[in-house]
Image (cartoon, grey):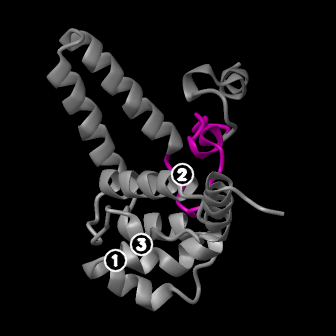
């Protein structure tokens, strides 16, 4: 069977693309280990897109990831590469994008609302009180277990009969004892 030049070139291009193994060698982005949530998330999103466009398998991606990690991230990778197989993204998030404490999130929300000037001071105050109420309800009890917020709030207890649900002014036992 004889092939024309065009047919041969098409066959050669199909064969070469099928045999080509993808890697991050041509990827222009890199990550240096900056501990910032937005930077980490944008890095992970970009690598995910590159990986899917270049059709890089998970195994090849793990093998070629050192090509795009620099400085502190490269040092981190050298320490954990044997342990990381399928959970690269979660490991990077855990190492370089720590969760922000609640007070920082609150400050961020208040700061964004103040920048936008989308409401009145009363609306902002109402939202802040709502957040405080939520935080009060979510507090953990003394023993550190995560019980429901309603069980961790102390119920009103009578000082006379020691039964919960009423105060001494409304205590029936005290009123009956007077009679």
Is residue 145 within the magenta segment?
A: yes
- Which residue is at 23% across, 12% downward? 118
Q: Is residue 153 above or below residue 57?
A: above
Disc 3 crowd, CA 10 A, few/some/many (<14, 14-19, 20+): few
Helix, strand or loop for disc 1: helix
Q: Is residue 156 above or below residue 123?
A: below
- Which residue is at 69% across, 59% downward? 11
Marker disc for residue 25? 3
Kindly check if marks 2 and 3 are in contact, taking CB atoms under 8 A apart as contact: no
Is residue 2 within the magenta segment?
A: no
Counting residues from the start of the chain, the first of labels 1 and 2 encountered is 2
Marker disc for residue 53? 2
Quick check: can you spot residue 178? yes
Considering depth in this image, is 142 or 117 the residue closer to the camera?
A: 117
- Which residue is at 32% across, 62% downward? 28
Q: Which residues are magenta?
A: 139-161
Helix, strand or loop for disc 2: helix
- Which residue is at 56% across, 62% downward? 144
Residue 71, image x, y percentages: 25, 80
Q: Residue 118 vs residue 160: left or right? A: left
Counting residues from the start of the chain, the first of labels 1 and 3 encountered is 3
Marker disc for residue 97? none
Q: Nearer the viewer, mark 1 or mark 3?
A: 3
Kindly check if marks 1 and 3 are in contact, taking CB atoms under 8 A apart as contact: no
Considering depth in this image, is 5 or 52 the residue closer to the camera?
A: 5
Disc 1 crowd, CA 10 A, few/some/many (<14, 14-19, 20+): many
């Amino acid at each position: 069977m004889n092939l024309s030049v065009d047919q041969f070139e098409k066959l050669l291009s199909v064969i070469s693309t099928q045999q080509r193994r993808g890697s991050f060698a041509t990827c222009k982005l890199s990550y240096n280990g900056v501990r910032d949530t937005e930077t980490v998330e944008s890095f992970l999103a970009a690598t995910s897109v590159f990986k899917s466009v270049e059709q890089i398998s998970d195994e090849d991606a793990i093998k070629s990831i050192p090509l795009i990690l620099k400085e502190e991230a490269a040092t981190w990778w050298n320490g954990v590469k044997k342990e990381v197989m399928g959970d690269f993204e979660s490991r990077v998030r855990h190492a370089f994008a720590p969760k922000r404490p609640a007070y920082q999130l609150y400050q961020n929300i208040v700061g964004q609302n103040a920048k936008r000037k989308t409401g009145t001071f009363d609306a902002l105050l109402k939202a802040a009180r709502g957040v405080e109420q939520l935080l009060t309800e979510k507090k953990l009890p003394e023993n550190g277990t995560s019980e429901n917020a309603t069980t961790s709030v102390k119920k009103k207890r009578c000082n006379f009969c020691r039964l919960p649900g009423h105060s001494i002014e409304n205590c029936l036992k005290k009123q009956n004892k007077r009679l």
